[in-house]
Amino acid sequence: MRGGNSTESARPPTPHNPNETRPMAKPRDREPKTKACAACGRPTVVAYRVRRTAAAVWEFVCPDCLERVKSGNPHYAYGGTWKGERH
Ligand SMILES: [Zn+2]
């Protein structure tokens, strides 16, 4: 015969800390993951910020159009890369 009810729940109850510090969940990114290419109008995940004309206007173009934009273009200027995907 054994004492059937010998449970080993002798541990003290661990208090649940309601203020447990967890990293703030970032709000959902509402930014679009793509940009519309200024040259062909297609959405592109990676866009290049370029100047295509003498006007000081920056536009975003896709990698394909970048080649076309910058070849033989005296006004071409590169202003950085935009990426819609984040890690
Ligand atoms: Zn394009």
Image (cartoon, rainbow, N blue to C red):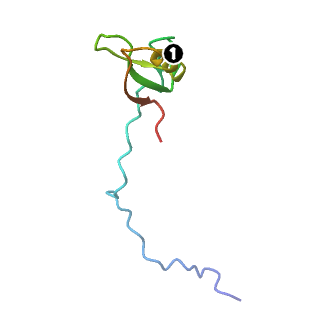
Which quadrant does the N terminus fall into? bottom right
- Residue at horizontal 52 percent and vertical 77 percent from the top: 9
* Amino acid beneath label 1: Arg
In this figure, which residue is indicated by the disc labeled 1? Answer: 68
In the displayed orientation, state which residue is furthest to the bottom: 1
- Residue at horizontal 51 percent and vertical 15 percent from the top: 68
Residue sitting nearer the eye, 51 or 85:
51
**Left or right of 17 in this view: 40:** right
In the displayed orientation, state which residue is furthest to the right: 1
Q: In this view, does 45 lie above or below 56?
A: below
Residue 52: % across, % down: 39, 13
Residue sitting nearer the eye, 30 or 72:
72
SS under mark 1: helix
Residue 71: % across, % down: 48, 17
Label 1, residues with CA under 10 Å away: few <14, some 14-19, many ≥20:
few
Q: In which quarter of the image is residue 76?
A: top left
Residue sitting nearer the eye, 18 or 51:
51
Q: How many marks?
A: 1
- Residue at horizontal 35 percent and vertical 10 percent from the top: 53
Q: Quadrant of residue 18?
A: bottom left
Q: Is residue 79 above or below residue 57?
A: below
Q: In which quarter of the image is residue 73?
A: top left
- Residue at horizontal 38 percent and vertical 63 percent from the top: 16
Distance from mark 1 CB to nearest ligand 1 atom below 8 Å: no
Residue 41: % across, % down: 50, 11
